[in-house]
Amino acid sequence: MTETNKNPWPTGIKQTIVFIADCSNKREMKLISSYITKFQPSGSKYEVVYRPLRNTALHSLRKGDLCQTLSKHTDCFLVPIRLNWEPKDKQNESLELIDFIAGRTTNPNRLHQFLSSLTGGLDNSVVVGLGATLSSLQSEFAKKQEQGFQYTNLSAFIERSALLSLEKAQRNVSGARYRIPHLINDEVLTRPAMRAALATIQKQSGKPLANLEKYARQCLTEMAATPTPMGNDLAAALGKFMSTRGFDPDIDIDEHEIERIRKLLKEKPVAFLFTHKSHIDGFLLIWLFHKYNLPPAHIFGGINMSLPGLGKLLRSSGAIFIRRSFSNDETYKAVFKNYIDYLGEKRFPVMWALEGTRSRIGKLMPPRYGLINYVASAYARDDAQDLVMMPISICYDQVPEIADYDALQGGGSKRPESASWFMEYISGLKNPHGKIHVSFGEGVPISRYIDKSNPVVEPRAVQKLAFDLAVDVNLATPVTVNGLICYVLLENGHRAINFKELSDGIASLLTLSKLLNFKVSNEVEHFSEATLRIYLQQLGETGVINIVNDGIESVYMIPHDSGRKAAFYRNGILHFLTTSAIAELALLGVRSDGDAAMAEFHHEALRIRELLKYEFFFQGSEDFIQTLEQEMSLRLPQWQSLISTGEIGAQEMIKQFEPLIGHGTLRSFIEAYLLIARTLRMEAAMRNSEPKALIERALTLGKQRVLQQRIHCEESVSSVYFENAIKIAESLNLLEASADVVERRQQWLNELRHLTANLRVLASVSDARRIAERARLEETLAYS
């Protein structure tokens, strides 16, 4: 039975009713008492026990001896009740920050309740949880004890049951957005699995069990979220404020996808993994889950974000703060595993950043395995439900942190987080940043990767799971207008182009996106000249591009200090272009004809794929070649007959491809690798190279090469790009001193020089087309 009127009395019950009234203050106690008295059926008998079930620290609100009451009425029927508050003028609307000051919330404090009695700003009603007989509760209590659960006594178990019943009833009234866990300490630390883990640690370490239990409680307090309805509302209001301050308030999200997620959450435990590009990400998702009445997710964050004030707010909205490393702390690991297990068992969704940190370069970074492994391990048992890992793509037209990302890539240091830093960050959100695009992947059930009969999840399975999540979220990430603009402008380096050249370049990319069926944003789907001009203006206002209006026509360019900023937005669309870009570059490596030409083409494509394996998420070799050939067939149906003619046919294909994307997609990465290779070649042969020092020297060399115009754009002078280049060098054993290391470093340098030369060939063909088109237009204008 669940009702939300003023009448708390159940129907059809002949026994004495024992109301367990959940109250937050004395005013609520008086209101509940008045409703019980007002609607009391004739001849009925009752007792009321008042308990602050949601905040057990409020001892003054504990009225009535439950144990004595149960002894007096052994055949009673227990009914949990509480008040429900609803703002009269805010029903079905998102809360704003101002509502918390005015008290227009579903969780008003004592002062707001008093003011409401004078102004009538809040309605209240009674929520009645599912009741039960004392005998049925006694039977359930005995079963739990047999299963190993520990409760202080029957009264404590009944109070716990009353709280859970009321929470379920409250969700039927207020919605899934207020579904939050209670009694976390008791539920997690008294689990049989938790107690067994501590017993094992005690045997292995020899530490007293009492000390381990005390430390386990400290660990849980340090990490656990303490969500409250008020905290959820406040964090959602803050998320809305941050996500609409400087951004278009209309978030690009498919509401049909929301319904798919809602259905999934009812059927299975779900872990959400989002792409991380901004500090806004977590707040945005808190707001969206609240807005669409989805159960709030428990978001994992680093302990460094548990800042004064902000940390308390985030905990109250579901944030779980974990240590950066705890691999050697068995007690902490046991607490974490059982906490995750508890959340999954109760169907509370969890959420974290797939990459573990913000992407400073705009494209998806390699997933971190740690949390994936721990969460998957919590479900690696026969009785666990099949967890679905659901990736979420968050894509911004522009991010507020772009200047910081640019500085970090150029060798700067990361600013430490603090409360003052956070306030400064919020104040900087007022600049125009365009739209935010949110989309969900298909989802990856972990049952595909783990053997539930084996409690240890194999590292290879975790890696495969993480890879498939990355592919899934990339496919869900749309092509955006700013991604297209920055792609075309960066293809031209720091050279200015006019509006027609820019729009023609974008038009050819749009044709390719339709041909290869890329996912695109709503603005790209309905692209127009007016849309393009709006986005150009926004990029100009934030300094990502320069717009020069002084000549006979407006021209657009990437300033010399904004290459990495523009690349951030372009990189967000590269995952769709990489395979075809590699195909174009591989064609320039074909020298044979006949069947040998095809084999040579495949070999060169796989070699380039291997070089870029730390930049992009490639399929296995066979699947990669299959996808490559499928895209080739869509772009140029007769490509197989052309390639059989060898080098001449390969060059003919390059001439026919429209657009050419090899240089625009791959050049910045290859040139960054070339800078590392050149720096490495200058290292002493008999001394190991240290990566950090190598990056610093490559940054210096890169800045010089930009000034000399020996590399295309300053974008390539990026510490993040260099880190991946060093991974390749390490895999080739080029950092360690040896007798032949100079020769092998030179060989790698030569290979990269050859690829760079081929990229310039692709660029020259593209430039020749542009110049020919400009000449044609100028000739037409001259004679018109």
Image (cartoon, grey):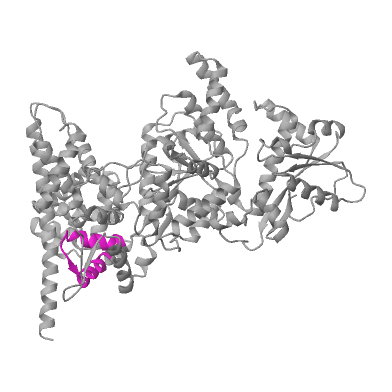
**Which residue is more in the foreground, 48 or 34?**
34
Instruction: Answer with left or right where residue 445 lies relative to residue 474.
Output: right
In the rendered image, the vertical position of residue 493 relative to residue 672, given as above or below: below
Q: Is residue 472 above or below residue 764?
A: above
x, y percent for residue 169: 69, 48
Q: Is residue 199 left or right of residue 618?
A: right
Q: Note whether residue 462 is visible.
A: yes
Q: Determine whether, in the image, residue 309 is placed left or right of residue 161.
A: left
Which residue is found at the position 57% from the left and 18% from the top? 210
Q: Residue furthest bottom?
A: 784
What's the magenta bit mostly, secondary-structure-wise?
Answer: helix
Residue reaching furthest to the right: 43
Q: 748 or 50: which is nearer to us?
A: 50
Give x and y (percent) for residue 364: 33, 48
Please, is residue 677 above or below residue 488 in the view?
Answer: above
Residue at position x 20%, y 65% in the image: 658
Q: How many marks?
A: 0
Is 256 magenta? The answer is no
**In the picture, residue 417 is in which quadrant?**
top left
Q: Is residue 589 visible?
A: no
List x then y, in percent, for residue 355: 36, 43
| Magenta residues (range) | 482-509
